[in-house]
Amino acid sequence: MGKKNKQFVEKITAMEDDFAQWYTDVVKQAELVDYGQVKGTMIIKPYGYAIWENVKDELDRMIKETGHSNVAFPLFIPESLLQKEKDHVEGFAPEVAWVTHGGEEKLQERIAVRPTSEVLFCEYYAKNIHSYRDLPKLYNQWGNVVRWEKTTRPFLRSSEFHWQEGHTAHATDEDAAKETDRMLNVYADLVEEYLAIPVLRGRKTEKEKFAGANYTLTIEALMHDGKALQSGTSHHFGSGFAEAFNITYLDENGDSQYVHQTSWGLSTRIMGALIMVHGDNRGLVVPPRIAPTQAMIVPIAQHKEGVLDKAYDLRDKLSNLVRVDIDASDKMPGWKFNEYEMKGIPVRIEMGPKDIDKEQVVLVRRDTGEKEFVALTELETRLPALLDEIQQNLYKKALDHRNEKTSVAKNMDELKTVLDNQGGFIKAMWCGDIACEEKIKEDTTATSRCIPFEQEKVSDTCVCCGKDAKEMVYWARAY
């Protein structure tokens, strides 16, 4: 490797030396974000937004396919409205940003910059739902929210972030429960099939559920450093919000009933998962299905006659098959190689005079670094197949890592040993007492990640107190 190329890579701290710094380096060097002027805010740069846009577009398609319509609700919430649901407001109170002035004039009532939009939808439903014929209401909103975080990091925990939030109203508790399950599975399918990240599906404990919900379902992913990341949640509200906001409808018998609601959301936090699951010491690795550019053509010795013409012809030929681009700048090929490895572009296509003579190209995989020579006559078949192989390999690699980092603990000593020496997900039995959950967090800084739908009995007693266990829980230190 040339000196300049080596220096380019050295801009990234090795993840084995300092994972947090590695993350920050990748975010900056891959040109995903820049820091905003207000603490905890971020400027999502064109390449970062292009990736998020592909995630967003796929999810938006999936949401619409399940019968939901997109809407847009206000950014501002009057304080009196936010106060209507006690548990909900208490859960968000420490993170709410308040507007106290309009211009120079002090407002008569403080206005919250939305941390989430439940109360806005509830107020709307109370005015617009009258009969069983008005149900279900299946709404989704793309927007941004503000939560005044003390400790921030781009994508993972920012004071302002982009997301979608679904809000639905149903005639029965059963219908709301089906919706809660359905949307969790939509999230899991998106993250596994498009971002190539395996997830655990399960229910949050009472302590960890969304404020005001009957229960919360979650998908949990494991990062390269052995920490967990909550990657999407779906909440069943039952009739709690409906009772607080008097959202009722007349059923088919003419009797008044409360509606049953759900809420679900996935945010730009998933970009942090993408970085930390697939990235390596050369930078970002982007799964082909969400990569803005799936293949980058790098002409070799492009100053020689015919090379650029052939490269542009190749781009035009491939553009109907894959998302392809060409770098015809005057930068050295080695610089370009490092640049697109840093940005995680799945495949690099090299084409020089010798390749043109042989009627071939060189394909270089970002995930493994392997090269292969492919005849031009076979490229239109081979390139899409290679992209699919990379997608599957990234998922398998992440799944193998999660399996290697999943352990069993039967008592607190084992739990602490695994957390300190290996990290990852730990399967352990729990008695169901919140006091044990809090003690585990206090003693180890690990939290309950989810109660998986697929239960195992790894022992008979609670990992903390030794009493009879009720269910198996995944525990981990988390972001």
Image: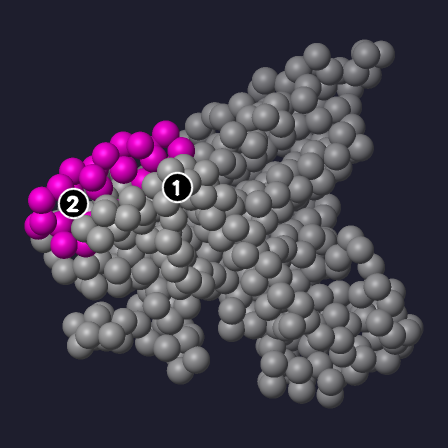
Q: At x 65% / y 51%, what residue is drawn? A: 218
Could you tell me how far apart the alpha carbons at marks 2 and 1 are, in whole angstroms? Answer: 18 Å
Magenta stretch: includes residue 191: no
Graded by Cα atoms within 10 Å as few (under 14), some (14 to 19) or many (20 or more), the crowding at tag 1 reads some
Mark 2 residue type: Val
Q: At x 36% / y 57%, what residue is drawn? A: 364
Q: Is residue 20 left or right of residue 120?
A: left
The image quadrant that residue 332 belongs to is bottom left
Residue 39 visible from this viewpoint: no
Residue 166 visible from this viewpoint: yes
> Is residue 166 placed above or below 274 in the rendered structure?
above
- The picture places residue 63, in percent across and down from the top left corner, at 56, 31
Q: Secondary structure at mark 1?
A: helix
Residue 307: mark: 2
Among numbered discs 2 and 1, the one appearing first in the sequence: 2
* Residue closer to the observer: 447 or 99: 447
Which residues are drawn in magenta? Answer: 297-324
Residue 379: mark: 1
Magenta stretch: includes residue 298: yes
> Is residue 270 placed above or below 1 in the rendered structure?
above
The image quadrant that residue 30 belongs to is bottom left
- The picture places residue 436, in percent across and down from the top left corner, at 76, 74
Q: Are the residues flagged by discs 2 and 1 in contact, CB closer than 8 Å? A: no
* Residue closer to the observer: 404 or 217: 404
Q: Name, please, the residue furthest toward the front.
A: 358
Mark 1 residue type: Leu
- The picture places residue 173, in percent across and down from the top left corner, at 78, 33
Q: Secondary structure at mark 2?
A: helix
- The picture places residue 24, in percent across and down from the top left corner, at 34, 67
Q: At x 59% / y 18%, what residue is drawn? A: 128
Graded by Cα atoms within 10 Å as few (under 14), some (14 to 19) or many (20 or more), the crowding at tag 2 reads many
